[in-house]
Amino acid sequence: MEVLVCIKRVPAVGGRMTLTQDEQQIDTRFLGFTVSPHEECAVEEAVRMVQEHGGSSTVLTLGTKDAEEQLRSALAIGVDRAILLETDGAEWDPVATAAAITDAIRSEREAGRGHDVLLFGNEAADTGDYQVGIRVAHALDLPCVVGIKGLQFADGKATARREAASGGWEIFEVGLPAVFTVKEGMNLPRYPSVPGRMRAKKKEVERLEPVHRSGGLERVRLKLPPEQAGDVEILGTGPEAASAVVALLQRLGVVER
């Protein structure tokens, strides 16, 4: 089984977000980078699928040369190949991104490296577009199941399941090749080991120069949501604060009078 998993380098969400002065980008000078939890699960699933069914796995991303860090993290947990669609750092919208990935997949096919399964995160952690995987599937005329949390294979077909709004499960059976977008919780991603990271450093990251196609949309500006203010009340210090704490818990209904 040949598996392709697509990821995106995004700012780590633990820090406070600030914008550049022109309000066109997130100021990343003091932020760490990672991939979204959905994509972490997609990478883990790709590794597990190859371990169970044989074949090989490839991780692909579109971004600057710094995105090599995220590719090597995927290599460190067991992905076999890495492809960087290297850009100059300019913004690529979902239409342009999907077109570049589609071109890369077609090039892989022409080189005799077709993929049975294409995995994407359900959405990017920074922009939340929910579009790239679906657009790639449409461009390649492949079946697509989004938001999955389970995937099994038998007799050349895939059975995918996702949570229904009612609380149950929706089950889909599709032929291969097919595209799936993965949601967090599908599995428990492993951490790269030290030996794995050492092996990943020695592996080649293949580089391609993608062609940018405008999606027809133009960003005007980014805007941060208003920060929520909070009040702090000091009830007292030492033993004298005990009665005030009890009164507060009674007002909240935590303890009875």
Image (cartoon, rainbow, N blue to C red):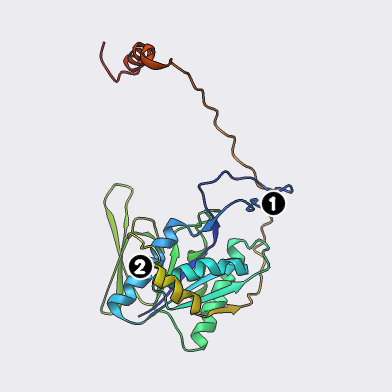
Mark 1 or 2 closer to N-term? 1
Amino acid carrying mark 1 in the image: Gln
Question: Which quarter of the rendered picture does the N terminus lie within?
Answer: bottom left
Residue sitting at x 65%, y 69%: 87
Name which quarter of the figure residue 33 lies in.
bottom right
Is the residue 16 above or below the residue 257 in the image?
Answer: below
Is the residue 161 above or below the residue 254 in the image?
Answer: below
Cβ–Cβ under 8 Å for marks 1 and 2: no
User: Residue 67 or 240: which is nearer the viewer?
Assistant: 240
Q: Within 10 Å of the Cα at label 1, are there few (<14), some (14-19), or many (20+) other Cα atoms?
A: some
Disc 1 secondary structure class: loop
Is the residue 233 above or below the residue 210 in the image?
Answer: above
Residue sitting at x 69%, y 56%: 218
The reply, left or right, for residue 5 in relation to residue 64 is left
User: Residue 230 or 145: which is nearer the viewer?
Assistant: 230
Spatial distance from mark 1 to mark 2, Cα to Cα? 34 Å
User: Which residue in the protein does label 2 denote?
Assistant: 45
* Residue 7, numbered circle: none
The reply, left or right, for residue 51 in relation to residue 128 is left
User: Residue 111 or 14: which is nearer the viewer?
Assistant: 14
* Residue 24, numbered circle: 1
Q: Position of residue 119 (x, y in %)?
A: 42, 68
Name which quarter of the figure residue 121 lies in.
bottom left
User: Residue 78 or 195: which is nearer the viewer?
Assistant: 195
The answer to whether residue 143 shows anywhere in this view is: no
Residue sitting at x 51%, y 57%: 124
Amino acid carrying mark 2 in the image: Glu
